[in-house]
Amino acid sequence: MILKEFQREPLRGKLLHADFYEVALDKKIEVSVHVELQGTPVGVKVEGGIVDFVTRELEIECLPTEIPDKITVDISHLALGKHLRVSELQLGANLRVLAEPDVVIAHVVLPRAEVAAEAEVAPAEGAAPAEGAAPAEPELIRKGKPVAEGEAPTEKVEKKAPFEKKEKEKK
């Protein structure tokens, strides 16, 4: 028997209900198995990258008696910008991964703050960077009728306190 799902009492955490599958021991089944990363990549130690753990579970097909608790993957060989795909996994002959071979399990990337800083430094394609140029200011958006350059706005807005209006209305 394999546990299908279970329900717990929300406050005390006691088991309320459990559903099981009855399986034949000679027929292969499809199950989800947790992926565990092992080791510290070279790209993290030497090059200052970080590990991005993309795929945390894999669907596999195997006999019920051969279901692994977890799939342990060694990532200590990964350099900065390199990745580990499903096709590179070395599992037993009786286990078959159902995911596509090009699915990424983990890769080593630069931290996002460094990537953003590099993007600001690099000029956009086709644009020449201005020397000593200040950062671009945000565009102001005004309500009402658009005003062409060089013209003064036609409407005048006066701000009055609410009590001034009441006093004028009384007179």
Image: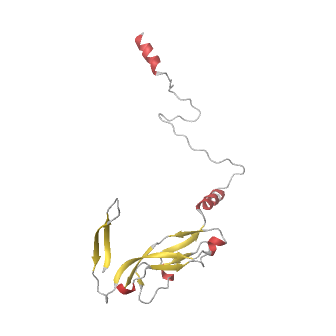
Vertical position of residue 164 compared to residue 7: above or below: above
- Toward which corner of the image does residue 40 lie, by quadrant? bottom right
- Kindly indicate the quadrant of the structure image that contains residue 114: bottom right
Give the position of the C terminus as an image quadrant: top left
Residue 89: percent from left, percent from top: 50, 82
Whether residue 95 appears in this view of the structure is yes
The number of callouts visible is 0
Nearer-the-camera pick, 22 or 122: 22
Q: Is residue 52 left or right of residue 166?
A: right
The reply to whether residue 63 is visible in this rendering is: no
- Residue closest to the eye, 171 or 66: 66
Colouring convention used in this rendered image of the protein = secondary structure
Say which residue appears at 53% left-offset and 77% top-offset.
84
Q: Considering depth in this image, is 37 or 17 the residue closer to the camera? A: 17
Residue at 49%, 82% (x, y): give it: 87
Image spot of residue 72 (x, y percent): 50, 79
Q: As rendered, which of 39 and 148 lies closer to the eye?
A: 39
Q: Which of the image's four quarters has the N terminus?
A: bottom left
Residue at 44% x, 90% y: name it.
93
Instruction: Tell me residue 79's x, y (percent).
Output: 62, 75
Q: Residue furthest right?
A: 131
**Position above or below: 45 against 91:** above
Answer left or right for 138 relative to 167: right
Question: Residue 53 at what x, y percent from top left?
Answer: 51, 70
Residue 39, quarter of the rendered image:
bottom right
Q: Is residue 115 left or right of residue 7?
A: right
Q: Is residue 147 left or right of residue 136?
A: left
- Residue that appears at 60% across and 75% down: 41
